[in-house]
Amino acid sequence: MVQRIRLRYTKRGRLRFTSHRDFQRAFERALRRAEVPMAYSAGFTPHPRVSYANAAPTGTGSEAEYLEIALAAPRDPGKLRELLDESMPAGLDIIDAVEARTSGLADRLTASVWELRLDGVEPAEAERAVAAFLAADTVEVQRRTKNGIRNFDTRGAVVSLVTLPAQVDRPSGQACAILRLVVRHLTPAVRPDDVLSGLRAVADLAPPVPSAVTRLAQGLFDEESGTVTDPLAPDREADTAAPPTAAVAADAKAPEGPAA
């Protein structure tokens, strides 16, 4: 391994129903099509060295999924991103790439920002449910796991939950409440559907159709500002102070013309 690249990708439209395993298969095909010089694991069944971080649940959209790849030869991150994006299905888009100059990407994914679109729910009804949820000390819900039914509190993981103004793109006469949720990544993980279960528990809020859920951001939660920061920012900052990898520098150098 001579270089590590961190990528940000999306799950949009119908491809929000793509499972994590489906994405892995699509991404490994893209690596082969783009002829990426991957580093491989050791052992009897070597596989490309790809590390996935905190993938969104199947059925939710996302603008902020992250992974890291290890390369056997250096490449320019921007050009690599373009090649991989061209090789991926539309909706699974590679939108950012940086060279890994720091450690601990997974440790910087401590919170997520989610948008929940509740079709068929009046904003005023959603506001009442949100107020009841935030006023509670604990909001216990149940989730089925491989070990059976598990009870856990959703309230402690929620940093903020607000109702947004009505969207101008919604057809007139159709109710639609939009919630913005910031949740910490705790154990057990509290997902947006758990928060919806909590809203049902404390205020009997039950959207008539499945909610459209999208992760807008994930990263380190800043206690002072109450915001979720870009997890790739430390690599970008370190990159400006570090010399480029030799092969990348040569790749970016413009060819010289003939001498006059």
Image (cartoon, rainbow, N blue to C red):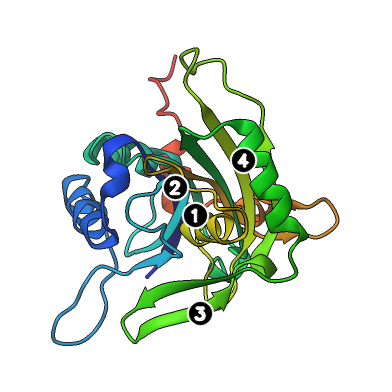
Does label 1 or label 4 sit earlier along the sequence?
A: 4
Foreground tag (2 vs 4): 4
What count of labels does the image hold? 4
Q: Check whether the beta carbons of the residues at disc 1 and disc 2 lie within 8 A of each other.
A: yes
What label sits on residue 207 in the rendered view?
Answer: none
Does label 4 or label 3 sit earlier along the sequence?
A: 4
User: Residue 143's image quarter?
Assistant: bottom left
Distance between mark 1 and mark 3 Cα atoms: 50 Å
Foreground tag (1 vs 3): 3
Does label 3 or label 2 sit earlier along the sequence?
A: 3
Which residue is nearer to you in this view: 229 or 139?
A: 139
Q: Residue furthest front?
A: 204
Placement of 260 over or under 249, stated as above or below: above
| Label 2: element kind | helix
**Left or right of residue 90: residue 156:** right
Distance between mark 1 and mark 2 Cα atoms: 5 Å
Q: For mark 1, what is the residue?
A: 245
Residue type, numbered disc 2:
Val
**Left or right of residue 238: residue 142:** left
Distance between mark 4 and mark 3 Cα atoms: 24 Å
Q: For mark 2, what is the residue?
A: 248
Q: Which residue: 21% across, 56% down? A: 22
| Label 4: element kind | helix
Quarter of the figure that contains the N terminus: bottom left
Q: Check whether the beta carbons of the residues at disc 2 and disc 4 lie within 8 A of each other.
A: no
